[in-house]
Image: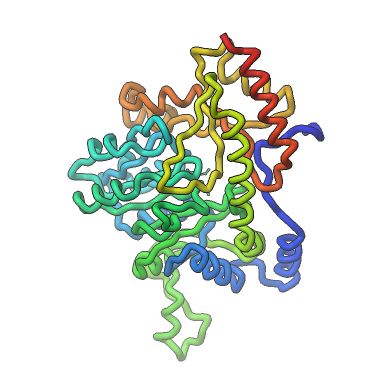
Amino acid sequence: MKNDFLQFHKPFISEEEVDEIVDTVRSGWIGMGPKTIRFENNFGKYIGVNKSVAVSSWTAAGHLTLEAFGLKAGDEVIVPTMTFPATAEIVCYFGAKPVFVDVEEDTLNMSIEALEKAITLKTKVIIPVHYAGQPCDLDEIHEIAQKYNLKVLEDAAHALPALYKGKKIGTISDVTCFSFYATKTLSTGEGGMICTNDEEIAKRCTIMRLHGINRDAWKRHTESGSWYYEVVAPGYKYNFTDLQASLGLPQLKKVDAMWESRKRIAAKYTEALKDLDTIQLLTLKPDRESSLHLFPIRLHLDKLTKNRAQIIDELRNLNIGVGVHFMPVHQHLYYNESFNLRDEDYPVATAAFPRLISLPIYPGMKDENVDKVIDVLIDMLTKFKK
Ligand SMILES: Cc1ncc(COP(=O)(O)O)c(C=O)c1O
């Protein structure tokens, strides 16, 4: 990569993380151990939730949650189409059916109207996705969940930290799952966290994340010693490790400071771009605060002489890396063919996709680079304006 190329994302790793990794490696214990437990406890305290179970990814967290909910083949789970495919694939693991719903135009979060229409007698779970980090309409979602007796699993892969009506995301629904993937607001390379106030769900997820082993069993068999364990179900290999916790522990201490940096960058972008008639910014609703994990813009293609691919190429030629979040899941081959899905049923997401570009936003991004993105983008949109 060229030296002056501005990457779409860079994790914010300092000497503290390096020292913590070295300490872990020197300790001789690099698997799941005391640092994982400390990370779970500190994370739970930060969020304000009783139970936090650390696992290998959001995907693992979501899978374990649906298992703990008792999802069965033939059940239905409602998922917005504007998400990463992981949100839907965890449903398919059970032979259950992901039922995709469209999103609302201003935020690209799950449409409440579409959600209620999609409910059938087979619906068991709703998975709202906090797109780009902005919380969904959780009051309305919970009202519907109560009315139809459904569980809510929040996909908060983008939403650390975020607030809904003053409450931290992670404290509101039956379960909230976070991602610590390389590009996320807190990164452990790969990783995820299950947050819940339900002791039984936390217990089941803890057992199932490591081969279905119940470590409490040794207490009932004291004569066998603490090496004793029992397998109570065919579980998974989804555990976290102390190496990952070595990145997570120092990152967690600065999670609010990293949020402040993203807020500063987002404010600069918003101020500079909000009045352009060639793009549309996401609307941020007043009663909630986004983590600002992503800064997506939508091109007004009818006012431009170039399409999204050409604009991305042009930005790349000018040393600016961007992303696209997301191709709607109903358009991906597997989902499209298996569930016979049609664009007409998802008009908002379908129209948004070819217009979407995510601008770089991360702590550690220098002011001069934010200014460069703004200047290059404004120049380009002026040059390509019809
Ligand atoms: C909305 C959303 N959900 C789930 C995931 C999956 O997260 P992980 O890679 O930790 O499994 C991602 C990852 O990019 C995501 O963006």
Return the x and y of residue 37 as percentages of the image width and height: 55, 71
Which residue does the image show at 73% across and 42% down from the upper left? 366
Which residue does the image show at 58% across and 50% down from the upper left? 185
Q: Is residue 135 left or right of residue 385?
A: left
Which residue does the image show at 59% across and 20% down from the upper left? 309
Quarter placement of the N terminus: top right
Quarter placement of the C terminus: top right
Q: Is residue 112 visible?
A: yes
* Total number of numbered discs in the rendering: 0
Q: Residue furthest bottom?
A: 223
Q: Is residue 89 visible?
A: no
**Residue 111 vs residue 340, the one in the foreground:** 111
Q: Is residue 265 left or right of residue 53?
A: right
Residue 85: image quadrant is: top left
In the rendered image, the vertical position of residue 95 relative to residue 197, given as above or below: above
Q: Is residue 147 left or right of residue 10?
A: left
**Residue 330 vs residue 111, the one in the foreground:** 111
Return the x and y of residue 34 as percentages of the image width and height: 60, 73
Q: Is residue 330 left or right of residue 148?
A: right
**Residue 344 vs residue 210, the one in the foreground:** 344
Q: Residue furthest right?
A: 3
Return the x and y of residue 225 as percentages of the image width and height: 50, 87
Return the x and y of residue 321 as percentages of the image width and height: 67, 31
In the rendered image, the vertical position of residue 363 relative to residue 222, given as above or below: above
Q: How does the figure colour the protein chain or chains?
A: rainbow
Which residue does the image show at 60% across and 57% down from the upper left? 255
In the rendered image, the vertical position of residue 193 relative to residue 301, given as above or below: below
